[in-house]
Amino acid sequence: MNKESIYGLTFDQLTAWLMEHGHKKSRASQVWDWLYRKRATDFSEMVDVNKECVQVLSEHYVIQTMLEHVRQESVDGTIKFLFKLKDGNLIETVLMRHKFGLSVCVTTQVGCNIGCSFCASGLLKKSRDLSSGEIVEQVMNVQHHLDQAAKDELVSHVVVMGIGEPLDNFENLVDFLTVVKDQKGLALAARHITVSTSGLADKIYEFTDADLRVNLAISLHAPNDEIRTRIMKINKAIPIAKLMKAIDYYLEKTNRRITLEYIMLKDVNDQREHAVELAELIGDRRQLANVNLIPYNPVDEHSQYQRPDRETISAFYDTLKKQGVSCSVRLEHGTDIDAACGQLRSKQIKVGV
């Protein structure tokens, strides 16, 4: 039997499954507590759960489905994990240390089909979606790493910004969010979770209607269609006007702030006129929008792009501010390791490890 990760079950799904297999409803709370509070790594550790329940769980599910393949640690405390899945595929997960807590960046797909011309994640095309259990397990593996360090540290924030397009794996994304937000388990606050999308407009409507209460970030990266189409092929199918219409629906229905991610590429989208045009595009949305400026991390395979100098970044930031646009420059993590998303995975596959 090809056993799935038990992390893929929401609490309600676990409860229903156990009852279908002849166990009391209360068993679910015990098992859930062992998974997410006591953080068992094997069903045999669940000593106060009756033996029949432990046996039936172990016959159908496993707790750990992936192995740590490579770990890179930065001087700033950032840790990049490369996990090997049970089918041999590799995915990246990153732990970042902030003043406000510990954040984990998770991957949602094996590879990526969005094909942004500046991104290492898209160097290897999507081969499959991750299950909800595989996404949850990334968070749990990082938490287990922290537990082993015995510093009483807990993951406090999650960003769904790793390899893949999260909204293209929508059902598994929703189950993942349901699990990590559950108050009986990890109890991550919705306001501490951010989902990023390259701009799948139809899915933004679906995401909005699902009322998940988590933060949304849009990978905009350009102030007009000409530049965005050049660097993000998705813009051919979903041009900026269609994307902004979906964003307006989100803002109107949720009244939540939204982040517009903007990677800065030297002499491509980083000039003052681009900042002015971006401010004009945001327009009346500026009350609920924040632009996150991201200095480009060079990738060998995308040598046509370079990182702007500090003066250019500062001038762009100042121009947006003068236009009344809320903005920030992303604090960089792990610059002394394979910092760009997908870079470590790409390198490992190339060398055949």
Image: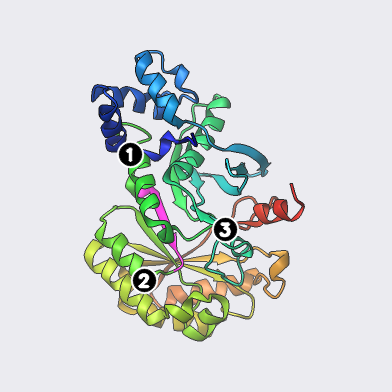
What label sits on residue 111 in the rendered view?
Answer: 3
Asked whether the beta carbons under mark 3 and mark 2 sit within 8 Å of each other, the answer is: no
Mark nearest the camera among 1 and 2 is 1
* Identity of the residue drawn at 43% across and 61% down: 168
Disc 1 to disc 2, how far (Cα)?
27 Å
Residue at 31% across / 69% down in the picture?
287
Reply above or below: 177 against 312. Answer: above
In depth, the one of 188 and 132 nearer the eye is: 132
Q: How crowded is mark 1: few (under 14 residues within 10 Å), some or many (20 or more)?
A: many
Up the image or down, 33 lies above or below 313; here it is above
Tag 1 and tag 2, C-beta contact below 8 Å: no
| Res 197 label | none
The residue singled out by tag 1 in the image is 10
Q: Name the residue under label 2.
A: 201
Task: Determine the CA span between mark 3 and mark 1.
Answer: 25 Å
Image spot of residue 62 (x, y percent): 47, 31
What residue type is disc 3 on?
Gly
Viewer-proximal residue among 244 and 114:
114
Question: Where's residue 345, x and y in %?
Answer: 65, 52
Is residue 44 toward the left or the right of residue 174 in the image? Answer: right
Q: Which amino acid does label 1 sit on?
A: Thr
Q: Main secondary structure of the magenta part?
A: strand
Q: Residues in magenta? A: 191-198
Query: Furthest-right residue in view?
Result: 351
Q: Work out whether residue 78 can be spotted.
A: no
User: Which mark sits nearer the N-terminus, 1 or 2?
Assistant: 1
- The three-letter code of the residue at mark 2 reads Ala
251 lies left or right of 242: left
Expressed as whole percent of the image width and height from the top left, the position of residue 27 reads: 29, 22
